[in-house]
Amino acid sequence: MNQHTPELPCHPGPFLLVPDAVLLPEGPAEGHAVAVADGSFTAVGPAGELARRHPSLTPVRLPGQLLMPGFVDAHHHLTQSFGSALAFGEPSEIFRRVWVPLEGALDEESAYVAAKLAALEALRGGFTTVADAGTRADVDVDVVASATRDAGIRCVLGLVCNDVDSGGPPDPAGPPRPRRGHTVLDRAERHLARHEGDPLVHASLAVSIPEAATEETLRRTARLAAAAGAVVQIHVNEHLAAVERSLVRHGLRPLEHLHALGALGPQLLAAHATLLTPREITLLADTGAAVSYNPVASAWKGNAVAPATTLAERGVRFGLGTDGTRGDGFRLAEAAEFAQRLAYGLVTGDSSCGAGWTWLEHATRGGADALGLGARTGTIAPGLAADFLLVDVTTPELALSWDLPWELVRRGNRDQITAVFVEGRLRLRHGRPVGWDGEALVRRAAELAHEAVGRAAITRVHPTSTTARERSVAR
């Protein structure tokens, strides 16, 4: 295994990297190189040709390394990192019992540390971009922006635009309880303008679930985002309970309700979308709306697995999201394929379920497209941001390669990631952040997490694993 890669450039360019192969959309290209300057790829092609075109650059040769696009996490909750393990063994709609109380217990420092801790985990897992679906902590959302910027990861930053009180279980037959509609929309406009031109932070709007916003706010956030070239992140058709509440209240499923309001379109990023009818898949395809397919979240606390192979076949835009479960891009891609195989492939005799490349592609450029960043990142190509990974392909899992894209999906893991670059800058090397103290952050996070969880009114259905074992043994 290659543990001694050459010294890597710690500046955004210009530099010329010559790995064993470069992962392009059509597959691995051996003998290729990339040139980087001002944070972007300026050239991608045969190494000899690029060396001749850039005589002033000394090629940095990277034997045993694959250069591939960074993973894109299309759905995250960065300020929930303190309670990641609180979701284990819990049934659906845990946001009411766990996440809302936890985020409500965060102050400015703990929100910053929680977000930066999540960003560090994401970088360690090969993610160069994360989409934050908006914090409900009572802090300025710029705290999250600062955390991701300081960590060095690209962030699509959601601002929660809820204007209906959803602090407790709503009466499904009763009217929504509106609050602060104009204030929410004013904040939304300011948020979209606030990060214009920021190289790493891209503004987004968010509504927790359709029932958490008035119909006017759902319409207006869609229009605001579309005009700004941003996305609106909404948890849609995730849990059976929410689908049934929508049917009782509107006579329509949540996605159908958004369509009736005119809120479906390329600006919508529908989080989860696990419970889709054929008609709703058609609505997604026809309107150009995007989905974040979150397979690990489905396994941990969902009611179903999104029909992602069908979405791919129908041309529905989608990316892969962690939902804050675990920050490992390779394991996410593997879970995406594995979930499709179990939920759909076994009963239909589909042994391929996307042939590997589908999940690798939607974990990178498909995710970037779903977030509205397809023209900025997600692919190794001239003019796009130099957001990429170096992966050691001399490991026992990858050295005997017959089909590298499949192997990356089925046998890749974050231990094989040598380096992570975002916007052309080296952000992580051998699992450690460059330019700041990751170990100190983890220590501080552990202190603050105990305090925050201790004061949050969290309600769990299931006990810890050790308590559950004690009860099982006692029985």
Image (cartoon, rainbow, N blue to C red):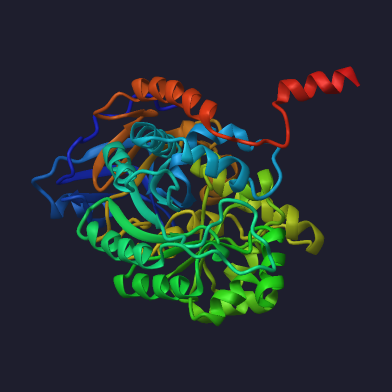
Q: 64 or 346, which lies in front?
A: 346
Q: 409 or 16, which lies in front?
A: 409
Q: Is residue 244 something one can see in this rendering?
A: yes
Residue at 67% from the left image edge and 46% from the top image edge: 301
Q: Is residue 412 something one can see in this rendering?
A: no
Residue 50: x, y in percent?
20, 53
Residue at 37% from the left image edge and 21% from the top image edge: 439
In the figure, is residue 195 to the left or right of 401? left
Number of numbered discs visible in the structure rendering = 0
Q: Report the quarter where the C terminus lies.
A: top right
Residue 239: x, y in percent?
67, 58
In the figure, is residue 447 to the left or right of 349? left
Q: 450 or 115, which lies in front?
A: 450
Residue at 44% from the left image edge and 40% from the top image edge: 79
Asked if 430 appears above or below 135 in the picture, the reply is above
Res. 210 image quadrant: bottom right
Q: Report the quarter where the N terminus lies.
A: top left
Residue lying furthest right in this view?
475
Asked if 181 appears above or below 30 in the picture, the reply is below
Residue at 40% from the left image edge and 74% from the top image edge: 220
Q: 405 or 51, which lies in front?
A: 405
Res. 63 image quadrant: top left
Residue 150: x, y in percent?
27, 37
Residue 127: x, y in percent?
41, 44
Asked if 475 appears above or below 264 in the picture, the reply is above
In the figure, is residue 23 to the left or right of 362? left
Asked if 71 appears above or below 231 in the picture, the reply is above
